[in-house]
């Protein structure tokens, strides 16, 4: 049984050859696609393509609850969320890797919780990411940066917007006062994982500067950066996954203690 789950985009394809694909039905509906099960560096993992096969599901239509619940059904305890983001700060350059420590939720209409009543839970999100996984991913990302030519940011606030449109100039200027990177998929994935008492870490790859920078980029340039970023993510996953210990030494497994009303 896989203890580690990966939710990511097309960039993660090819990092492992799935041994099997499972069609899973959850009480919240279908996950984005068949759950692929295989090994990365000899460790059993489950992978869900967040936007489905062929990238057909936009960020606001992803069934985040079904994705997390499907992993829970497979007994996954740790979730690695891979996302592509825009940069809100000059020093967070396209091609860099960010392991965020905070986020701001600017989404508008998603399914945010497994606790819609009669059972009510208010989980803490003060420190939204698993400290143990963050430490491992920062360490590995730093080891790889010299060879792959990028910088690792061990902190950063991810602002999650509803999409699918990009920000206005005014929004981008506002967001950059408080956040470092901007994307459309972290929320509610991260908080649903916590409600399931799973560990969650986010690995964000920067594709371009957001609109505040007034630096229009071509699709070709974005595609080139994304391709290079895929290689970085693969290298990091290959190295980080075997370093994740069997036992969890973090508060994530007790997230519901004192949270259920
Ligand atoms: Zn944890």
Image: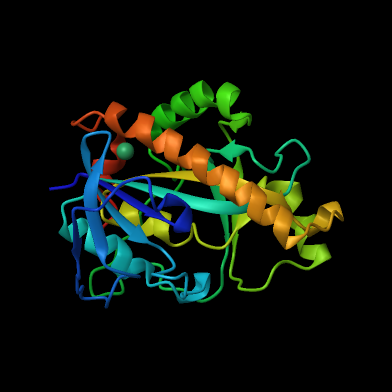
- State the image quarter where residue 21 is shown: bottom left
* Residue located at (61% from left, 73% from top): 164
Drawn side of residue 23 relative to residue 147, left or right: left
Where does residue 99 sit, x and y in percent of width and height? 52, 38
- The percent coordinates of residue 210 (x first, y second) are 74, 55
Residue 136 vertical placement versus 29 (above, below): above
Question: Which of 168/243 is in front?
Answer: 243
> Is 230 positioned to the left or the right of 238 in the image?
right
Number of numbered discs: 0
Residue sticking out furthest to the left:
1
Rendered image coloring scheme: rainbow
Q: Which residue is at 22% across, 48% downward? A: 38
Residue 132 visible in the snapshot:
no
Q: Position of 257 compared to 136: left or right? A: left
> Residue 93: x percent and y percent?
71, 40
Q: List x then y, in percent, for residue 178.
A: 70, 48
Q: Is residue 20 visible?
A: yes
- Looking at the image, residue 144 sits to the left or right of residue 194; the answer is right
Depth check: 14 or 79 in front? 14
Quadrant (top left, top right, bottom left, bottom right) of the C terminus? bottom left
Who's the residue at 59% across and 43% down the image? Answer: 228
Task: Identify the residue shown where x is 79% and y is 59%.
Answer: 211
The picture quadrant for ligand 1 comes to top left
């Amino acid at each position: 049984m896989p203890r580690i789950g990966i939710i990511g985009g097309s960039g993660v394809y090819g990092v492992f050859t799935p041994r099997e694909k499972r069609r899973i039905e959850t009480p919240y509906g279908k996950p984005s696609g068949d759950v692929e099960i295989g090994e990365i560096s000899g460790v059993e993992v489950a992978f869900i393509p967040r936007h489905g096969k062929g990238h057909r599901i936009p960020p606001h239509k992803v069934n985040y609850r079904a994705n997390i619940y499907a992993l829970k059904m497979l007994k996954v305890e740790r979730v690695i969320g891979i996302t592509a983001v825009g940069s809100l700060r000059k020093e967070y350059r396209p091609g860099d890797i960010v392991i965020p420590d905070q986020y701001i939720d600017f989404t508008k209409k998603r399914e945010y919780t497994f606790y819609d009543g009669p059972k009510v839970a208010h989980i803490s999100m003060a420190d939204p990411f698993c400290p143990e996984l963050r430490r491992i991913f920062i360490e590995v990302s730093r080891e790889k940066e010299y060879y792959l030519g990028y910088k690792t940011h061990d902190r950063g606030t991810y602002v999650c917007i509803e999409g699918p449109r990009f920000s206005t100039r005014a929004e981008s200027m506002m967001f950059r006062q408080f956040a470092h990177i901007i994307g459309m998929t972290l929320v509610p994935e991260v908080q649903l994982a916590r409600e399931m008492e799973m560990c969650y870490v986010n690995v964000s790859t920067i594709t371009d500067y957001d609109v505040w920078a007034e630096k229009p980029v071509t699709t070709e340039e974005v595609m080139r950066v994304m391709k290079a970023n895929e290689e970085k993510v693969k290298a990091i996953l290959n190295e980080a996954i075997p370093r994740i210990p069997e036992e969890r030494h973090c508060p994530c497994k007790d997230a519901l203690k004192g949270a259920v009303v």
